[in-house]
Image: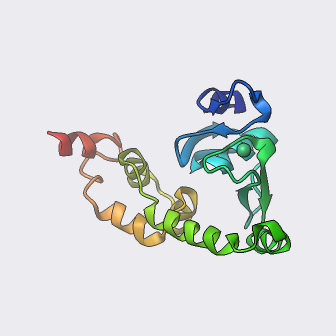
């Protein structure tokens, strides 16, 4: 997707709330092709970048303010470094006890983060380092290494990233 409108059209939005309400996006990652950045990235990061027209500052992550999982409405997002996010959670009495859950969910989310076949093909076609790829796809460098060893990089992968997949499907 290239614009925020592309993303918005893929979201479930309560017609009564309109664009001010939550934009529910069913995917954890989105492919963005824009001047601000190209690649597969976390959906919230994609929404933030498309809305602001600039990359997220190094070391910053995009967090949701509304508490709705899967919401990518840019008005409900903010970019914070993790320490700031921790402080803002701790400062809110209403969220006492939630911090632990947030951390737990984040840990689960990280473990659950899986690469799609398409991502694996892109990883195998990419000349970038494992560290750079791990950051781009939001997974560990170990996961990237596994993806690279997984066999999707069959002969011809450099000219056709789908070659390995098609071979596997036969
Ligand atoms: Zn929301």
Check the image and report above or below for 12 versus 119: above
Indicate the colouring scheme. Answer: rainbow
Q: Quadrant of residue 57?
A: bottom right
Q: Is residue 128 above or below residue 89?
A: above
Q: Which is nearer the eye, 17 or 133?
A: 17
The residue under the point 61% across, 47% down is 70
- Residue 141 relative to residue 22: left or right: left
Q: Position of residue 130 (x, y in %)?
A: 48, 66
Q: At x 39% / y 49%, what residue is drawn? A: 116
Residue 153 placement (x, y as % from top left): 30, 54
Can you give x and y, in whole percent of width and height, for residue 95 in the image?
76, 67
Residue 53: in sight, yes or no? no
The image quarter in which residue 149 lies: bottom left
Q: Position of residue 75 (x, y in %)?
A: 81, 43
Residue closest to the eye, 128 or 80: 80
User: Can residue 63 be seen from the camera position used here?
Assistant: yes
Ligand 1, by image quadrant, is top right
Quarter in which the N terminus is drawn: top right
Q: In the rendered view, would you say 114 is above or below 143?
A: above
């Amino acid at each position: 997707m290239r614009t925020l409108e592309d993303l918005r059209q893929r979201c479930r939005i309560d017609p009564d709330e309109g664009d001010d309400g939550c934009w529910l996006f069913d995917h954890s990652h989105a492919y963005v092709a824009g001047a601000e950045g190209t690649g597969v990235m976390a959906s919230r990061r994609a929404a933030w970048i498309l809305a602001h027209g600039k990359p997220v500052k190094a070391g910053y992550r995009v967090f949701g303010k509304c508490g709705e999982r899967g919401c990518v409405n840019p008005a409900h997002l903010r970019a914070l470094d993790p320490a700031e996010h921790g402080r803002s959670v701790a400062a809110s009495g209403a969220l006492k006890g939630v911090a632990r859950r947030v951390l737990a969910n984040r840990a689960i989310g990280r473990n659950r983060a899986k690469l799609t076949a398409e991502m694996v093909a892109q990883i195998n076609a990419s000349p970038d380092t494992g560290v750079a790829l791990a950051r781009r796809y939001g997974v560990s460098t170990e996961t990237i290494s596994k993806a690279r060893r997984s066999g999707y990089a069959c002969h011809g992968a450099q000219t056709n990233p789908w070659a390995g997949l098609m071979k596997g499907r036969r």
